[in-house]
Image: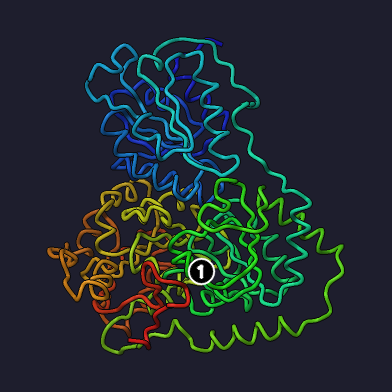
Amino acid sequence: MQLTGAEIVIRCLQEENVKFLFGYPGGAVLNIYDEIFKQDKFKHVLVRHEQAAVHAADAYARATGEVGVALVTSGPGATNAVTGIATAYMDSIPMVVLSGQVPTPAIGMDAFQEVDMVGITRPCVKHNFLVRNIDELASTIKKAFYIAASGRPGPVVVDIPKDVTAHVGEFVYPESVQMRSYNPVLKGHSGQIKKALKLLLEAKRPMIYAGGGVVLGDAAEPLTKLVRQLGFPITNTLMGLGGYPATDKQFVGMLGMHGTLEANMAMQECDVLLAVGARFDDRVIGNPAHFFQNPRTIIHIDVDPSSISKRVKVDVPIVGDVKSVLADMLQLLDETEKPHNAEPLKAWWQKIEDWRGKNCLKYATSSDIIKPQYVIEKLWEATKGDAFVTSDVGQHQMWAAQYYKFDKPRRWLNSGGLGTMGVGLPYAMGAQFAFPDAQVACITGEGSIQMNIQELSTCKQFHLPIKVILLNNRYLGMVRQWQEFFYENRYSESYVDALPDFVKLAESYGHVGMRIEKPGDVESALKEAFGPSNKERFVFMDFITDQKENVFPMVPNGKGLSEIILAEDL
């Protein structure tokens, strides 16, 4: 079958069962856009900025588990996409980004809108390709989808020169991919799994620490089953929230810099630690030297061998797909005789309950000024804990993680590794396209929301009934908090002056705008926003919150988990 390169691109996307393509047109990709116009197998979503296209594709992947797909033009279109690509790379999100390139004879000649997309993105992609020959186009796109979704997922860039999209060639889409240089290990070593289970069953102070790999690997069900059978405490990372039900008694909360006292202390004082799909990053364990002051045996399950013993030396490494390894562990547990001495575990739980009894997430309520934590608590009630919740980055992100109890995986969409401001609204768009009938809430700050606020236009065009919860404290909140704690209250450039009237701004795009200034109005406003009258409407809620509120608990940068600061300590 003889097709143009542009036609081949479209056929490849159809073969991969792509449902949504997020993009923005430009000269280098006009041949592709012309073919998009002629087809009806997938829907193209016109964003208002290329960064938003990649973020929306990223969120679509996070919410569904499928590969997200974005299309951008050459030059500035490609460079605008880099932040979104790096965001997905840091959080291991499966994504394919198609970028236009100048014609092959012009490459390296400083042609109009030419950038070296392969060179620019090399540090922040799982892999990238420059397709110079139409005969390699279909096989390259097949490889891109395979690489993006397999093993440890990640973004793959396919850079396509304009003349390749105009050339004619034979279209054959490969049924499978075999790459000698890329063969991810999926099955865990049975001997290592047996050794790990023996250590867990003999532990006196066991702890399970689960990260984003549990969510990405669709392993929440076997993890939950294992935790409940063992009766052990479990904590989730920021990216792992929803991987174990937050309302379950065995869940001790999120750990790390803004994690709970009970989660951090249990991590520090456990004797056997099972890490599942997590990477011991700096925001989780703090100072590694402090972490290793307490001896413990560490078991680490991860599909990416390079993540094991990268920051923390582990005793029992298990390389493999977390879902597969946990299933094998469960089967072995069913066949293994359990120890009869339950007293050490009972004593361990008592110690955890003592830490839990301090109620580290308690905050001072007010009848005069809205507390941001209160808004999140009421949002959880209004949505019955069943919404897709996106966030930007900052204090509001941490409050969302602390106070919205995620019981299901793939409901919490935020930028963890890169910490990208501006993701919240396009993330909400990606989730809403994936699940048009679901409740989608975007929790944001007045600094973050303005970084991609142009997407209010996209939401209007596609009638997306997203609900924005703006926790407006008129500061770059997390910057202000650090300046208060570590820079002697020198608030250098953290005050956000000249803010727009967000209600009028939302209304100018044809959306519903609300301004909420009193604590007594919070619950009713949320009920109205999520109620029947606004079910099909985009609602922008501007909550005027306490400017001085800080996120607690907090482990200062460079400190250890047990050096945690509680609100009552100040």
- Left or right relative to 464: residue 193: right
Residue 33 image position (x, y, % from top left): 37, 26
Residue 262 image position (x, y, % from top left): 53, 79
Extreme residue toward the left, this view:
498
Instruction: Write the residue at 66% across / 82% down.
Output: 348
Would you identify the image quadrant in which residue 29 lies? top left
- Above or below, 431 against 16 in this view is below
- Left or right relative to 33: residue 184: right
- Left or right relative to 290: residue 305: right
Instruction: Write the residue at 71% across / 80% down.
Output: 345
Task: State the quadrant of the N terminus.
Answer: top right
Viewer-proximal residue, 29 or 181? 181
- Tell me the crowding category of disc 1: few under 14, some 14 to 19, or many 20 or more residues within 10 angstroms, Cα based: some
Amino acid type of the residue that numbered disc 1 sits on in the rendered structure: Phe
Would you identify the image quadrant in which residue 4 lies? top left
Instruction: Write the residue at 64% across / 87% down.
Output: 350
- Above or below, 211 against 395 in this view is above
Number of labels in the image equals 1
Task: State the quadrant of the C terminus.
Answer: bottom left
Instruction: Write the residue at 46% across / 57% down.
Output: 413
Q: Give the structural element (helix, strand or loop) at label 1.
A: helix
Q: Where is mark 1, residue-wise?
A: 291
Residue 15 image position (x, y, % from top left): 57, 28
Q: How is the image coloured?
A: rainbow
Residue 529 image position (x, y, % from top left): 38, 69
Viewer-proximal residue, 28 or 313? 313
- Above or below, 328 against 251 in this view is above
- Above or below, 219 against 387 in this view is above
